[in-house]
Amino acid sequence: MSWQTELSSWMFPSYLATSDPPAVGSKAPSSPQFVMPATDGKPTIVTFLRHCGCPFAEKTYLSLRAAASQHPDVHCIAISHSDAPSTDRWLQSLSDSSQDSAVNMVVDDERRIYAAWGLGVSSFWHVLNPWSLYSVYALGKQDNIWNRPTESGTRWQSAGSFAVAGDGTVKWSKPNVSADDVPDFEEALKALG
């Protein structure tokens, strides 16, 4: 990690055409890069993370990991747009990585899966509004989750989470409204029944 990689995370990424986020009741998007694992009929929670190093991505991942360990009847998938080596190092830096096997990590460093699920480049206000900036400090004080080095990925990529029934129908759709928006996976589990 160097100051150049930190600086590059602030550069706007290349443009990708982005679909609308899937609505509740619609079929989950499918693409050559990512096909839902619904062949066994189990429901799935998919969460798209902000860049590895972001404290809100860490909080989201840890929350998903906790839900996955308590609900083995639900597939839990996290998607990272940081490259594979950076994602692996980030995962290793998180405490209690023994539970990581409960979450399937998918790397989408070209952001094509993000785009298929309606998650594009966010606005300046989405990332740098005063509430999000304060939330970085509050999350650090409350949960001891602080910014980590950013080796790859962009701070401008939006995130979101979705719950999908075993038949591929979206039951819960939550694109993030700001950088500090951390999903409530209990809501997702309730939506799945």
Image (spheres, rainbow, N blue to C red):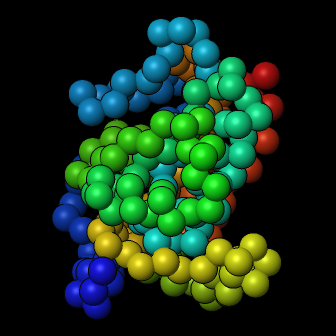
Q: Point out residue 166 in the picture as x, y percentages from the top left corner.
A: 59, 15
Which residue sits at x=31%, y=47%?
A: 108
187 left or right, relative to 91: right
Of residues 109 and 22, the one drawn nearer to the viewer in this rendering: 109
Which residue sits at x=69%, y=52%?
A: 63
Which residue sits at x=38%, y=75%?
A: 150
Q: Point out residue 188 in the picture as x, y percentages from the top left corner.
A: 71, 37
Where is the C terminus found, in terms of image quarters?
top right
Instruction: Give the residue at the far left of this rendering.
Output: 14
Q: Is residue 49 above or below residue 172?
A: below
Q: Is residue 103 above or below residue 167?
A: below
The answer to whether residue 74 is visible is yes
Which residue sits at x=76%, y=34%?
A: 70
**Figure label count:** 0
Question: Residue 7 sits in which quadrant?
Answer: bottom left
Q: Point out residue 124 in the picture as x, y percentages from the top left corner.
A: 43, 80
Q: Point out residue 31 in the picture as x, y percentages from the top left corner.
A: 29, 29
The answer to whether residue 135 is visible is no
Of residues 39 and 122, the one drawn nearer to the viewer in this rendering: 39
Where is the N terminus found, in terms of image quarters?
bottom left
Question: Residue 76 sits in which quadrant?
Answer: top right
Of residues 77 and 192, the one drawn nearer to the viewer in this rendering: 77
Q: Is residue 122 above or below residue 96?
A: below
152 left or right, relative to 22: left
